[in-house]
Image: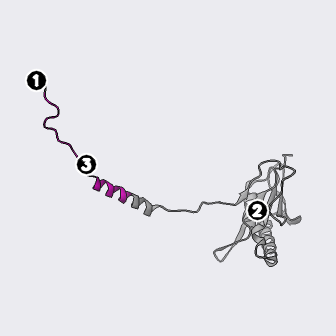
Amino acid sequence: MKIRNRNAGTTKIEVPMAPMIDVVFQLLIFFMLTLKIVAPEGDFSINMPLGVPSQSAVTDADLPPFRVRMEADPQTGELVQLLFNGNALGNDPRQAFPLLNREVMRAVEALKATGPGNLDKQEVEIDPDYGLKYEYIIAAISSCSGRMENGKVIPFISKIKFAPIRQEQ
Protein backbone atom coordinates (compact mmCIF):
# COMPACT_ATOMS: atom_id res chain seq x y z
CA MET A 1 0.00 0.00 0.00
CA LYS A 2 1.28 3.39 -0.96
CA ILE A 3 0.92 6.28 1.50
CA ARG A 4 0.31 9.61 -0.07
CA ASN A 5 1.80 12.82 1.17
CA ARG A 6 -1.02 14.82 2.65
CA ASN A 7 0.66 18.18 2.16
CA ALA A 8 1.31 17.71 -1.48
CA GLY A 9 -1.11 19.40 -3.86
CA THR A 10 -3.25 21.11 -1.24
CA THR A 11 -3.91 24.81 -1.50
CA LYS A 12 -4.91 27.16 1.25
CA ILE A 13 -8.47 28.46 0.84
CA GLU A 14 -9.01 32.06 1.90
CA VAL A 15 -12.45 33.38 2.76
CA PRO A 16 -13.09 36.92 1.50
CA MET A 17 -14.03 39.06 4.51
CA ALA A 18 -15.28 42.21 2.72
CA PRO A 19 -18.62 40.69 1.55
CA MET A 20 -19.21 39.24 5.01
CA ILE A 21 -18.69 42.61 6.66
CA ASP A 22 -21.02 44.24 4.09
CA VAL A 23 -23.77 41.75 4.89
CA VAL A 24 -23.35 42.30 8.65
CA PHE A 25 -23.61 46.07 8.23
CA GLN A 26 -26.68 45.73 6.01
CA LEU A 27 -28.37 43.53 8.63
CA LEU A 28 -27.44 45.99 11.38
CA ILE A 29 -28.87 48.93 9.42
CA PHE A 30 -32.03 46.95 8.59
CA PHE A 31 -32.74 46.13 12.22
CA MET A 32 -31.97 49.66 13.38
CA LEU A 33 -34.38 51.14 10.85
CA THR A 34 -37.20 48.68 11.59
CA LEU A 35 -36.98 49.04 15.38
CA LYS A 36 -40.08 50.70 16.79
CA ILE A 37 -39.68 52.29 20.18
CA VAL A 38 -43.03 52.24 21.96
CA ALA A 39 -43.81 53.93 25.26
CA PRO A 40 -44.79 51.33 27.86
CA GLU A 41 -48.51 51.18 28.53
CA GLY A 42 -49.83 51.77 32.00
CA ASP A 43 -46.60 53.31 33.24
CA PHE A 44 -47.66 54.99 36.47
CA SER A 45 -45.19 56.61 38.83
CA ILE A 46 -46.42 54.72 41.85
CA ASN A 47 -44.59 54.05 45.08
CA MET A 48 -45.93 50.78 46.45
CA PRO A 49 -45.79 50.25 50.22
CA LEU A 50 -43.24 47.74 51.45
CA GLY A 51 -45.20 46.93 54.56
CA VAL A 52 -45.81 48.58 57.88
CA PRO A 53 -43.81 51.84 57.94
CA SER A 54 -41.32 52.43 60.70
CA GLN A 55 -41.98 55.08 63.32
CA SER A 56 -39.05 57.23 62.13
CA ALA A 57 -40.12 57.35 58.47
CA VAL A 58 -40.08 60.93 57.16
CA THR A 59 -41.33 61.96 53.72
CA ASP A 60 -39.35 64.26 51.45
CA ALA A 61 -42.39 66.32 50.49
CA ASP A 62 -43.02 69.53 52.38
CA LEU A 63 -46.72 69.46 51.48
CA PRO A 64 -49.19 66.99 52.95
CA PRO A 65 -50.36 64.55 50.28
CA PHE A 66 -53.84 64.65 48.81
CA ARG A 67 -55.66 61.71 50.36
CA VAL A 68 -58.06 59.56 48.37
CA ARG A 69 -59.90 57.07 50.58
CA MET A 70 -61.98 54.31 49.01
CA GLU A 71 -64.26 52.19 51.16
CA ALA A 72 -65.47 48.84 49.85
CA ASP A 73 -68.34 46.49 50.55
CA PRO A 74 -66.66 43.53 52.31
CA GLN A 75 -68.70 40.89 50.46
CA THR A 76 -68.76 42.21 46.89
CA GLY A 77 -65.76 44.55 46.70
CA GLU A 78 -67.93 47.30 45.21
CA LEU A 79 -67.24 50.95 46.01
CA VAL A 80 -69.23 52.14 49.02
CA GLN A 81 -67.68 55.59 49.54
CA LEU A 82 -65.05 57.74 47.82
CA LEU A 83 -63.44 60.51 49.86
CA PHE A 84 -60.98 63.20 48.80
CA ASN A 85 -59.18 64.86 51.72
CA GLY A 86 -62.02 63.77 53.99
CA ASN A 87 -64.81 65.14 51.75
CA ALA A 88 -67.32 62.56 50.53
CA LEU A 89 -67.68 62.38 46.76
CA GLY A 90 -70.32 59.64 46.61
CA ASN A 91 -70.48 55.96 45.85
CA ASP A 92 -71.61 55.85 42.20
CA PRO A 93 -68.41 55.30 40.17
CA ARG A 94 -69.88 57.09 37.12
CA GLN A 95 -70.27 60.29 39.16
CA ALA A 96 -67.67 59.96 41.93
CA PHE A 97 -64.54 59.57 39.76
CA PRO A 98 -65.29 62.54 37.46
CA LEU A 99 -65.98 64.54 40.63
CA LEU A 100 -62.63 63.36 42.04
CA ASN A 101 -60.96 64.48 38.81
CA ARG A 102 -62.51 67.97 39.15
CA GLU A 103 -61.51 68.22 42.82
CA VAL A 104 -57.91 67.26 42.03
CA MET A 105 -57.89 69.79 39.19
CA ARG A 106 -59.09 72.53 41.58
CA ALA A 107 -56.47 71.56 44.15
CA VAL A 108 -53.75 71.56 41.47
CA GLU A 109 -54.82 75.01 40.23
CA ALA A 110 -54.70 76.34 43.80
CA LEU A 111 -51.29 74.74 44.25
CA LYS A 112 -49.98 76.33 41.04
CA ALA A 113 -51.00 79.73 42.42
CA THR A 114 -48.79 79.25 45.50
CA GLY A 115 -45.62 78.65 43.49
CA PRO A 116 -44.31 76.81 40.44
CA GLY A 117 -42.18 74.29 42.35
CA ASN A 118 -44.93 73.08 44.66
CA LEU A 119 -46.69 70.99 42.02
CA ASP A 120 -43.59 68.82 41.53
CA LYS A 121 -43.51 68.07 45.27
CA GLN A 122 -47.20 67.24 45.63
CA GLU A 123 -48.22 63.61 46.09
CA VAL A 124 -51.50 61.73 46.11
CA GLU A 125 -51.96 58.96 48.66
CA ILE A 126 -54.54 56.33 47.70
CA ASP A 127 -55.99 54.40 50.63
CA PRO A 128 -58.29 51.59 49.42
CA ASP A 129 -60.02 48.96 51.55
CA TYR A 130 -58.55 45.47 51.38
CA GLY A 131 -61.26 43.86 49.24
CA LEU A 132 -61.90 46.75 46.81
CA LYS A 133 -62.03 45.79 43.13
CA TYR A 134 -58.98 46.86 41.14
CA GLU A 135 -61.02 48.72 38.54
CA TYR A 136 -61.83 51.38 41.16
CA ILE A 137 -58.17 51.75 42.12
CA ILE A 138 -57.19 52.24 38.48
CA ALA A 139 -60.02 54.76 38.04
CA ALA A 140 -58.72 56.70 41.07
CA ILE A 141 -55.17 56.69 39.67
CA SER A 142 -56.45 57.93 36.32
CA SER A 143 -58.58 60.64 37.94
CA CYS A 144 -55.63 61.94 39.98
CA SER A 145 -52.99 61.78 37.26
CA GLY A 146 -54.72 63.97 34.64
CA ARG A 147 -57.52 64.48 32.17
CA MET A 148 -58.11 64.49 28.41
CA GLU A 149 -59.22 67.72 26.75
CA ASN A 150 -59.51 68.11 22.98
CA GLY A 151 -57.42 64.98 22.42
CA LYS A 152 -54.56 66.23 24.61
CA VAL A 153 -53.51 64.90 27.99
CA ILE A 154 -53.38 67.54 30.72
CA PRO A 155 -51.26 66.08 33.54
CA PHE A 156 -52.10 66.85 37.15
CA ILE A 157 -49.95 64.91 39.59
CA SER A 158 -47.34 62.30 38.74
CA LYS A 159 -46.40 61.20 42.27
CA ILE A 160 -48.97 58.66 43.38
CA LYS A 161 -48.41 56.37 46.33
CA PHE A 162 -50.46 53.91 48.32
CA ALA A 163 -51.18 54.03 52.03
CA PRO A 164 -49.93 51.11 54.12
CA ILE A 165 -52.00 48.00 53.61
CA ARG A 166 -55.02 47.69 55.87
CA GLN A 167 -55.66 44.29 57.38
CA GLU A 168 -58.56 42.28 55.98
CA GLN A 169 -61.59 42.62 58.24
Percent position (x, y) of residue 18? 28, 56
Residue placed furthest toward the left = 2
- In what element is the residue under mark 1? loop
Question: What numbered label is drawn on residue 140?
Answer: 2
- Residue 152 falls inside the magenta stretch: no
What amino acid is at disc 1?
Lys
- In what element is the residue under mark 3? loop
Q: Residue at x 81, y 74 (%)?
A: 111
Percent position (x, y) of residue 112? 78, 76
Residue 103, by quadrant, is bottom right
Q: Which residue is mark 1?
A: 2
- In the image, 33 versus 93, the foreground residue is 33
- Residue 25 falls inside the magenta stretch: yes
How far apart are the alpha carbons under marks 1 and 2? 91 Å
How far apart are the alpha carbons under marks 3 and 2? 64 Å
In the image, which residues are magenta? Answer: 4-27
- Camera-near label (1 vs 2) is 1
- Camera-near label (3 vs 2) is 3
Q: Residue at x 80, y 59 (%)?
A: 126
Q: Pointer 2: residues within 10 angstroms few (<14), some, or many (20+)?
A: many
Q: Which residue is mark 3?
A: 15
Q: Residue at x 10, y 23 (%)?
A: 2
Q: Are marks 1 and 2 in contact (CB under 8 Å)?
A: no
- In the image, 53 versus 109, the foreground residue is 53
Percent position (x, y) of residue 144? 75, 66
What amino acid is at disc 2?
Ala
- In what element is the residue under mark 2? helix
